[in-house]
């Protein structure tokens, strides 16, 4: 393969980098509002189940493919089975489409960092909803999106060790520290107990709602960076001595901790202010500033929270930027520098399309107004590309490849005992695929 492939420094580095990909807006921005709209703790229980029954097995499948092949998401599958090389393009497509809206939301966090720092977020005569709408209609949304692309570009351009690994070692501990500080602060707010009850008391009727189940599976994929090639590419930088099972468990545990901590920050604060926890993405950018307003040092707490959001976003944009960068480098034989620039350009271009173009859909009984490419990119990736990518990874790893391949990778070829391997193989062969297929059919209203 020519030049020696870069690798992460050690086991902790591998965990922090993979966790950085998994812990993103899916845990902090998406999880609270999806949970709030779908039964609170009932959604949390379904999410936990999906992570352990579907998320971890699929992550291990992707880890195994990536480390064994030492290639991009497309090249990885080609090395193991040339006839299946098309499977890798699901990861590339997923990473590309997510780039088409993720940088936009990430840029929102930069706007709120700046307005919190300057104090204009709280000195403006406009309501927070009006400020948010005005920002989305202004050129600043494009400027901050481009700034976030450039920030990601700078880190990726520094390479695997000096860029991705070094950034993750700083961002992940800082993210946890900020979350813990915020969780302790909101615990002392009046009425916070109602938020804990909402979040921790399950509505069991929601457990049998197909839409809630669908969202839980989608959230598990979204928050663990599965189905888009991120874990395949990152695992290609793992050392042969890395314990894949231990890494997957650690990454999943850290992701769950962040998701729960985010809920323990958001819901008590929302209930303390007497607001509704079901306000969609605006929960973060409208409701939380409203809550911070009544706290001492409002601008400081707001600044800290949106730094947290930006860190979570950056850890994810780094991962799918790297998926595309390695694809262009290895498939088209471009230099890494050229691949980084190409990926950044495509990401910014897709985001511009998502921001600018809106249209109506009138087809048969389907009538939707003011639909944007932002909505389409979000829906297609979270509900179709990521689950399908995970489904195909299950089939490829558990059915097409010999069990000895997966067992060898997970036990480091005899270094570990692998007692749980039969259970993992069963989950990958039957439980995970069947659950994903069920969710896909339910999403398409076929069942």
Image (cartoon, grey):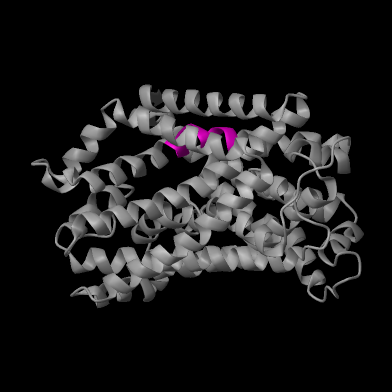
Residue 150 horizontal side relative to residue 418, left or right: left
| x, y percent for residue 104 | 41, 35
Number of numbered markers: 0
Q: Quadrant of the N terminus?
A: top right
Q: Can the viewer see residue 356?
A: yes
| x, y percent for residue 339 | 66, 27
Taking the spot 70% from the left edge, 61% from the top edge, the residue there is: 57
Q: Which residues are magenta?
A: 94-103
Taking the magenta stretch, the answer to whether it contains residue 99 is: yes
Camera-nearest residue between 254 and 51? 254
| x, y percent for residue 260 | 44, 68
In the rendered image, the vertical position of residue 200 relative to residue 10, given as above or below: below
Taking the spot 33% from the left edge, 31% from the top edge, the residue there is: 141
Name the quadrant containing residue 2: top right
Residue lying furthest left: 125
Magenta span: chief secondary structure: helix
Residue 359 horizontal side relative to residue 339, left or right: left
Q: Can the viewer see residue 94?
A: no
| x, y percent for residue 49 | 57, 68
Camera-nearest residue between 324 and 74? 324
Camera-nearest residue between 148 and 372? 148
Name the quadrant containing residue 288: bottom left
Residue 433 horizontal side relative to residue 207, left or right: right
Camera-nearest residue between 143 and 196? 143
Taking the magenta stretch, the answer to whether it contains residue 434 is: no
């Amino acid at each position: 393969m020519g030049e020696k492939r870069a690798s992460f420094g050690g086991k902790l580095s591998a965990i922090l980098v993979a966790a950085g990909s998994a812990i993103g807006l899916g845990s902090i921005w998406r999880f609270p509002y999806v949970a709030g709209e779908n039964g609170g703790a009932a959604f949390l229980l379904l999410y936990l189940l999906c992570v352990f029954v579907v998320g971890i097995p699929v992550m291990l499948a992707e880890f195994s493919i990536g480390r064994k092949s030492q290639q991009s998401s497309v090249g990885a599958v080609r090395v193991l089975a040339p006839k299946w090389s098309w499977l890798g393009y699901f990861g590339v497509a997923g990473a590309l489409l997510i780039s088409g809206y993720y940088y936009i939301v990430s840029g929102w966090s930069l706007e709120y960092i700046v307005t919190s720092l300057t104090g204009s977020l709280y000195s403006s005569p406009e309501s927070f909803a009006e400020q948010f709408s005005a920002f989305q209609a202004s050129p600043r949304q494009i400027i901050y999106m481009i700034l976030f692309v450039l920030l990601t570009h700078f880190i990726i351009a520094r390479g695997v060790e000096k860029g991705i690994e070094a950034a993750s070692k700083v961002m992940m501990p800082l993210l946890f520290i900020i979350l813990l500080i915020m969780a302790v602060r909101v615990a002392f707010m009046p009425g916070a107990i109602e938020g804990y009850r909402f979040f921790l008391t399950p509505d069991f009727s929601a457990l049998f709602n197909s839409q809630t189940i669908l969202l839980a599976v989608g959230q598990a994929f979204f928050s663990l960076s599965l189905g888009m090639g991120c874990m395949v590419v990152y695992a290609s930088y793992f050392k042969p001595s890395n314990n894949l099972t231990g890494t997957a468990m650690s990454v999943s545990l850290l992701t769950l901790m962040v998701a729960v901590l985010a809920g323990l920050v958001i819901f008590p604060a929302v209930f303390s202010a007497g607001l509704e926890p079901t306000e969609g993405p605006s929960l973060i950018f409208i409701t939380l500033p409203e809550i911070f307003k009544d706290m001492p040092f409002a601008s400081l707490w707001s600044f800290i929270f949106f730094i947290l959001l930006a860190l979570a976003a950056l850890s994810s944009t780094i991962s799918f930027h790297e998926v595309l960068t390695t694809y262009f480098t290895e498939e088209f034989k471009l230099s890494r520098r050229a691949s980084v620039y190409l990926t950044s350009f495509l990401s910014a271009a897709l985001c511009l399309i998502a921001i600018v173009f809106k249209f109506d859909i009138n087809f048969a009984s389907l009538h939707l107004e003011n639909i944007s490419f932002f909505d389409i990119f979000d829906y297609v990736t979270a509900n179709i590309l990521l689950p399908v990518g995970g489904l195909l990874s299950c089939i490829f790893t558990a059915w097409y490849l010999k069990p000895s391949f997966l067992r060898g990778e997970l036990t480091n070829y005899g270094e570990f005992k692998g007692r749980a391997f039969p259970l993992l193989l069963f989950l990958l062969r039957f439980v995970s695929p069947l659950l994903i297929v069920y969710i896909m059919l339910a999403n398409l209203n076929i069942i």
